[in-house]
Image (tube, rainbow, N blue to C red):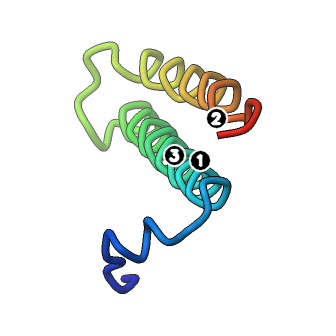
Amino acid sequence: MRPHTSTTEWQSLSDETQLALAQQAMRQAAKIIADQAELFAVQFQTKTLADRGAADALKLFAVLLRETSADCLRPMGNA
């Protein structure tokens, strides 16, 4: 686990650095969520978890999350 960063430390970073770090954090979060959705889909398909039609929905969710996060997290102009 990373050490806690204080608000003062964060505010001392340039706007560009804050934006880059925030975008990277959002990309990582989207990847983690998409990976978890795929893992659940596999568990439904292999009958590890009871499937009530969720596997295909989770696969679609993972694809949509990856696609939309790729588009909306691209740098756009200057912050």
Above or below: residue 21 compared with residue 62:
below
Q: Amino acid at mark 1?
A: Gln
On the image, which quarter does residue 46 sit in?
top left
What separation in Å lies between label 2 and label 3 (alpha carbons)?
8 Å
Name the residue at 63% across, 26% down.
72
- Asked if labels 3 and 2 touch by Cβ distance under 8 angstroms, the answer is yes
Q: Quadrant of the C terminus?
A: top right
Q: Secondary structure at mark 2?
A: loop
Residue bearing the label numbered 2: 73
| Left or right: 30 as drawn, with respect to 48 | right
Residue bearing the label numbered 3: 26
Tell me where residue 68 appears, x and y as whole percent: 61, 22
Q: Nearer the viewer, residue 40 or 26?
A: 26
Total tally of numbered discs in the picture: 3
For the residue carrying disc 2, how many other residues have a C-alpha within 10 Å: few (<14), some (14-19), or many (20+)?
A: some
Which comes before the other along the chain, label 1 or label 2?
1
Q: Secondary structure at mark 3?
A: helix
Name the residue at 59% across, 50% down.
19
Above or below: residue 39 compared with residue 16:
above
Name the residue at 53% across, 52% down.
22
